[in-house]
Image (cartoon, coloured by chain):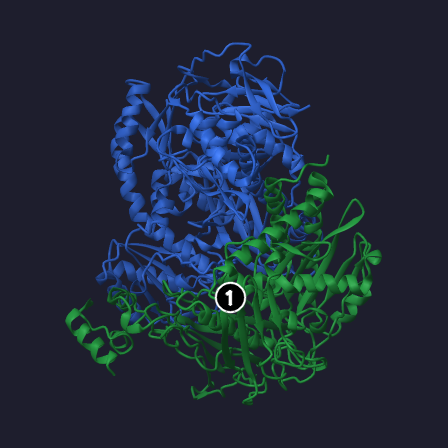
Chain colours: A green, B blue
């Protein structure tokens, strides 16, 4: 029965499609076996037949959602042609140059059919723990060509008319470390696709093609209108920001490696122009263009358009220029495995350029997560690959402190007691660091310190996003910086080099102390409510000394001395 | 006589069940400080001089104390290096972060989280002996800090509790009489954050619950003997057990409704039931198979909503067996609003104060209840036995205003609101069925709560269900559940080993050990264990998977092999593939259930049941959407249903309204239950 289109049915169908994306994510996370899928390094999306995204699932969500989903569908359609896409097909790719991210991120894409018509796509990726190549994990900065980074799967059919191409899967599995987990993750994603098709079919049966398509049109249209309306209220002008990369992936400084963006706020559109961004780096810290665009869109969504429905319509009024051959759009076969540090820096850059346009309204960026990736052998002789993501906390908001030690995404850590089950390591500590939050009227989150003692020999890969601490905004100061220390079995400690990517050969008894940076503060620390400073001191997040040093607040006997505080703050202000 | 009282956010429902199976009901305002007095007063009113042989109580006191951070001042002792385990949690943030998000405050502030130098390895061996002198100093520091209780949770203690047990002894020496809990006793399961959180919640609630129950029992004991408490798992237990293990009662309130639905389903011989409980601010769904509600092994207290996968972990985690309820923010009081030209409903609720516009108590924003009044689903004059006047004109005006913004008339807008609310509630029904691997079309929908029966048939239609059951007393269903519950205690033992590396004898011996402990506990508390029934469950997952699946222990000569086969089959049903790799046996779970005197729902008779002046032939106009239009619907009461009646019709109960859309019919089953089916 064809129904007249109405604004209510739109909301009903939108809810159901959002549920499909969510069910897909849950089924995948529950059945996948690689650690990253479990901690939430995954995204699901549902789109119409042309790739306009509508529902988004859990996990990392926004990064990959917007342009990547659309880009992948566009490439499938271009490569195969609609006539060669059939029910029961599932495509897969991990190719940075076919719309993917870095090689460990493997996408599965399942076309959906209504009355024989290609009507939608269900997409999902999870981050696999390995993809072959020189360095375990496939995300080192120490590569120049993507050939070194592991095996690249172009966009192709993994499942054709319901039949899994076992030979193809076997060829891939022969090239990766931890093949069993790799297969488990693929199976988990197939489950997600299976769930999604069930969900899509329910929607098709109930509402029919026309209502379903009307939903996409309408939701996209009004999202676009909402976004244009919001842009109209922004101050017009040209705004700039830049941030330098810490190194080129090999630990070498390169003054050309600077991320620069120019934002032009027009009548009802935004232009983010990265033309002045530095050239493609020698190491693997280049961001594949769909990832880079995804970061721009997700930052806009989070910082500017948080209230509009989550659809592809948001992308329409936002133009992005990312020249080929640059850090944010590398030329093939440039290596991209370590693109994560640069991707987080693009996000940081977005905060800063938007803070120029909207002073006092934009939060300080969060710290995403560093990485300790350890490849070793269990006591029973089998392989152990542990990819420990170490989330930091949130930057200060213009109205409140940044939450400490909790990631600003659906990504979690791996529980200590689960990580230790392989018996290759023992976690000695995981703590918030006192006095480490970026001072400001509102404080940034504290640094997180993790201490790992290794019980077995193995290869360790450390990713450190922030070699320099994150600056604050509006006069807020940076948090405590990251640090890597190696302590050998005899207790000798040495600081490891300041490099985004480190590779170490670990001996039993070696201990790594890794500190994830604290986040920046917002506003002048001398304006912070002394009561809030006292609260931090009472909660042992700040020492009495740091209260005076960082905030000019004098605390005696667990109370604020108002007179001395006023004097100290005045003295500081005039300094 | 048995008395059941269920404390909700606004009202406390009280039921008195006489030995003659006659049921008297009352509603009183929920005032926690005077619960005991109010119950005694109600008791006098309902049955003067009656002797009570059992009080059964459902309460939100524990979840409220946790959500509002009003637990006892408690200390935490952790392994050196881990004092921040509470604020760090699993470090997962909200999956769709709004820039405004605030982390929940840990239940224990950092100065009262102290470390002890010791370490157990993941193979259970001691890596570092405990520094006892240091531990004593930390205990004294906590005592000086004014703690009422101490929670102890050390890394890997679920595999070897030797250091926790020693810490318990040291606490007894340093602070004789101080309450303490060891995580190895409370929740011996892998993963340090949920174990710590569970232990902390149990410990910090003990003083709160003890004071509450002491006060309550002092009031009630002159009128009867036992006070029994509803647990999150749908079983009841004595108040003295709850004083020691209050973590089992954090979801005490919501569990009772699902339990009532389960008992009703069993009595009616319904195999597959989706229960749907819609109140003022939220709707809850639960899946019931063979008379048993699905369970989950953890709940998150204070999480905003429990539909969807990750967000639920943003409350305070408690790992206890609980009825698997999924809750969404849509209820009768949910407010309709417009976003981007499209209609949205909830999660904000007008609550009881000011309430919907039609209650004329100052509410101005249109709610789902107002939509039902405008459409004619709810009586345009009075509801609730004539106690509550309805101002339809005010509701209509609110919907005219809303409709104008959307470019549609008031009726379309009101109908739209019910449709959107249904779409939100569908999320809950989908979550307990599709997400758990069940096809909702194989189920009967059982609807209750004040607003459930209004929406039931429409919801059933949109999820493909063609049979709806409205039980007797839908508005008091949760309180009724209290009268029907069995006694229950749960015990758990950690295994954390590949199934291939365990032999069947070891598994059975561990279960026998758990059973002995459960039997002793029941006997100690005066629940006769002679009739006890044990249910054995195993938690299994593939190595490196995220979640365990809880299965009934199968039989078989080769037990580990039988468990593996059952797991593979279940995995295939739920996720579509068998999976490869090593199957791990993570936990053994034991439920010990002692049946309480059975009460047959169908035998109940309500005292002073409302007299309605409805007569055969009454009708009112109800709007059933653009396709079906405005139809004249019969207005009936339950008593008037004899034989099969065709929709469109509404049945007015004292505390709810049941809507029979066109194309559906209703009949009575047993003395009071209604079956609505699609023609």
Splitting the image into 4 quarters, where does residue B434 fall? top right
Where is residue B616? Give x, y as percent. Answer: 54, 9
Where is residue B15? Give x, y as percent. Answer: 39, 25
Would you say residue B24 is visible in this rendering?
Answer: yes
Give above or below for B271 relative to A370.
above
Q: Is residue A350 left or right of residue A13?
A: left
Of residue B294 and residue A323, the one placed in the foreground of this image is: A323
Of residue A210 and residue B669, the one placed in the foreground of this image is: A210
Q: Is residue A83 left or right of residue A307?
A: right
Splitting the image into 4 quarters, where does residue B445 fall? top right
Q: Quarter holding the C terminus of chain A?
A: bottom left
Residue extending farthest right: A83
**What residue lies at 48% left-to-right and 65% top-to-bottom?**
A407
Give above or below for B212 relative to B91.
above
Where is residue B210? Give x, y as percent. Answer: 29, 44
- Which class describes the residues within 10 Å of circle 1: few (<14), some (14-19), or many (20+)? many
Determine the secondary structure under disc 1. loop
Disc 1: which residue: A413
Q: Is residue A558 left or right of residue B248?
A: left
Would you say residue B552 is visible in this rendering?
Answer: no
Chain letter for the residue marked with disc 1 in the picture: A
């Amino acid at each position: 029965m064809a129904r007249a289109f109405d604004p209510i049915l739109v909301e009903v169908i939108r809810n159901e499609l959002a549920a499909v994306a969510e069910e897909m994510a849950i089924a995948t996370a529950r059945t996948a076996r690689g650690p990253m899928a479990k901690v939430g390094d995954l995204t699901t999306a549902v789109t119409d037949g042309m790739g306009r995204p509508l529902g988004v699932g859990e996990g990392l969500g926004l990064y990959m959602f917007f342009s990547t989903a659309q880009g992948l569908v566009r490439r499938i359609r271009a490569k195969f042609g609609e006539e060669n896409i059939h029910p029961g097909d599932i495509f897969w790719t991990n190719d940075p140059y076919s719309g993917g991210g870095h090689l460990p991120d493997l996408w599965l894409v399942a076309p959906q059919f209504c009355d024989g018509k290609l009507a939608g796509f269900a997409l999902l990726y999870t981050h696999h723990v390995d993809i072959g190549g020189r360095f375990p994990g496939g995300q080192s900065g120490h590569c120049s060509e993507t050939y070194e980074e592991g095996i690249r799967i172009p966009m192709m059919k993994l499942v054709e008319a319901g039949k899994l191409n076992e030979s193809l899967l076997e060829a891939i599995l022969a090239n990766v470390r931890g093949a069993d987990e790799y297969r488990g993750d693929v199976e988990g994603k197939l489950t997600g696709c299976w769930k999604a098709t069930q969900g899509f079919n329910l929607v098709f049966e109930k509402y029919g093609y026309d209502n379903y398509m009307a939903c996409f049109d309408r939701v996209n249209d009004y999202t676009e209108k909402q976004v244009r309306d919001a842009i109209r209220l922004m101050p017009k002008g040209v705004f700039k920001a830049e941030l330098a990369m810490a190194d080129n992936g090999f630990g070498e400084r390169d003054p050309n490696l600077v991320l620069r963006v120019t934002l032009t706020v027009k009548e009802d559109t935004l232009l983010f122009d990265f033309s002045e961004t530095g050239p493609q780096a020698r190491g693997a810290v280049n961001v594949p263009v769909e990832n880079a665009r995804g970061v721009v869109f997700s930052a806009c969504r989070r910082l500017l358009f948080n209230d509009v429905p989550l659809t592809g319509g948001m992308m329409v009024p936002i133009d992005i220029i990312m020249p080929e051959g640059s850090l944010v759009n590398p030329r093939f076969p440039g290596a991209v495995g370590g693109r994560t540090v640069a991707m987080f820096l693009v996000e940081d850059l977005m905060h800063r350029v938007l803070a120029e346009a909207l002073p006092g309204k934009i939060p300080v960026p969060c710290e995403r997560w560093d990485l300790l990736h350890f490849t070793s052998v269990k006591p029973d002789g089998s392989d152990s690959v542990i990819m420990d993501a170490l989330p930091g906390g949130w930057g200060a908001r213009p109205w409140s402190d940044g939450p400490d030690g909790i990631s600003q995404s659906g990504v979690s850590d791996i529980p200590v007691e689960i990580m230790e089950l392989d018996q290759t390591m023992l976690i000695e500590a995981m703590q918030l660091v006192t006095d480490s939050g970026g001072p400001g009227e509102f404080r940034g989150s504290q640094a997180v310190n993790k201490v790992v003692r290794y019980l077995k020999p193995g290869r360790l890969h450390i990713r450190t996003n922030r070699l320099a601490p994150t600056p604050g905004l509006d006069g807020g100061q940076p948090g405590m910086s990251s640090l890597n220390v190696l302590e050998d079995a005899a207790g000798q400690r040495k600081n490891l080099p300041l490099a985004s990517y480190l590779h170490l050969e670990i001996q039993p008894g070696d201990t790594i102390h890794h500190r994830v940076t604290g986040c920046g503060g917002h506003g002048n620390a001398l304006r912070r409510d002394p009561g809030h400073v006292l609260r931090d001191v009472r909660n042992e997040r700040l020492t009495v000394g740091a209260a005076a040093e960082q905030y000019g607040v004098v605390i005696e006997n667990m109370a604020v001395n108002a007179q001395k505080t006023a004097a100290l703050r005045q003295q500081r202000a005039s300094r | 006589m048995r008395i059941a009282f269920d404390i909700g956010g606004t009202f406390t429902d009280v039921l008195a069940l006489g030995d003659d199976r006659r049921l008297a009901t009352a509603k009183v305002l929920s005032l926690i400080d005077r619960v005991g007095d109010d119950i005694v007063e109600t008791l006098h009113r309902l049955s003067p001089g009656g002797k009570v042989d059992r009080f059964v109580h459902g309460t939100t006191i524990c979840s409220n104390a946790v959500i509002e951070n009003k637990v006892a001042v408690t200390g935490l002792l952790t392994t050196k290096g881990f004092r921040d385990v509470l604020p760090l949690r699993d470090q997962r943030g909200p999956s769709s972060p709004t820039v405004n998000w605030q982390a929940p405050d840990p239940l224990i502030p950092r100065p009262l989280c102290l470390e002890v130098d010791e370490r157990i390895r993941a193979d259970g061996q001691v890596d570092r002996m405990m520094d006892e002198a240091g531990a004593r100093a930390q205990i004294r520091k906590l005592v000086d800090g004014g703690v009422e209780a101490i929670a102890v949770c050390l890394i890997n203690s679920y595999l070897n509790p030797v250091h926790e047990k020693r810490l318990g002894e040291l606490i007894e020496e340093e602070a004789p009489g101080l309450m303490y809990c060891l995580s190895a006793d409370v929740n011996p399961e892998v993963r340090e954050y949920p174990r710590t959180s569970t232990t902390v919640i149990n410990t910090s609630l003990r003083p709160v619950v003890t004071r509450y129950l002491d006060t309550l029992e002092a009031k009630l004991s002159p009128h009867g003997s036992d006070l029994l408490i509803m647990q999150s798992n749908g079983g009841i237990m004595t108040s003295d057990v709850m004083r020691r293990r209050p973590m089992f009662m954090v979801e005490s309130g919501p569990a009772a409704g699902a339990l009532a639905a389960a008992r009703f389903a069993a009595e009616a011989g319904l195999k597959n039931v989706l229960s749907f409980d819609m109140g003022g601010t939220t709707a809850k769904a639960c899946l019931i198979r063979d008379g048993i509600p699905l369970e989950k092994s953890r709940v998150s207290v204070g999480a905003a909503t429990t539909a969807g996968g990750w967000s639920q972990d943003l409350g305070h985690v408690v790992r206890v067996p609980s009825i698997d309820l999924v809750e969404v923010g849509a209820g009768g009081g949910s407010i309709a609003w417009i976003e981007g030209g499209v209609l949205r409903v909830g999660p904000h609720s007008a609550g009881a104060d000011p309430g919907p516009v039609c209650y004329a108590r100052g509410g101005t924003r249109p709610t789902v209840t107002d939509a039902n009044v405008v459409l004619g689903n709810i009586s345009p004059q009075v509801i609730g036995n004539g106690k509550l006047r309805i101002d339809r004109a005010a509701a209509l005006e609110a919907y005219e205003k809303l409709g104008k913004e959307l470019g549609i008339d008031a009726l379309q807008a009101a109908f739209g609101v019910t449709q959107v609310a249904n779409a939100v509630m569908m999320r809950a029904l989908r979550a307990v069925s599709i997400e758990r691997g069940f096809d909702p079309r194989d189920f009967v929908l059982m609807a209750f709560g004040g607003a459930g029966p209004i929406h039931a048939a429409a919801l059933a239609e949109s999820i493909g269900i063609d049979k709806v059951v409205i039980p007797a007393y839908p508005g008091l269903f949760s309180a009724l559940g209290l009268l029907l519950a069995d006694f229950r205690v749960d015990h758990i033992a950690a295994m954390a080993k590949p199934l291939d590396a365990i032999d069947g004898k070891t598994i059975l011996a561990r279960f026998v050990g758990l059973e002995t402990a459960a039997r002793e506990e029941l006997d100690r508390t005066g629940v006769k264990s002679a009739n006890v029934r044990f249910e054995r469950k195993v938690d299994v997952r593939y190595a490196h998977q995220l979640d365990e699946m809880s299965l009934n222990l199968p039989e078989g000569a080769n037990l580990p092999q039988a468990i593996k086969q059952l797991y593979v089959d279940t995995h295939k049903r739920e996720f579509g593939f068998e999976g490869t790799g090593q199957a791990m046996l993570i936990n053994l779970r034991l439920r010990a259930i002692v049946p309480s005197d059975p009460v047959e729902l169908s035998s109940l008779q309500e005292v002073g049941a409302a007299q309605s002046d409805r007569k055969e032939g009454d009708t009112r106009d109800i709007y059933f959407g653009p396709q079906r239009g405005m139809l004249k619907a019969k207005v009936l009461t339950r008593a008037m249903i004899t034989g099969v009646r065709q929709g469109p019709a509404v049945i007015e109960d004292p505390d709810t309204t049941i809507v029979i859309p066109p194309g559906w019919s209703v009949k009575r089953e047993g003395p009071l239950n209604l079956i609505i089916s699609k023609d």
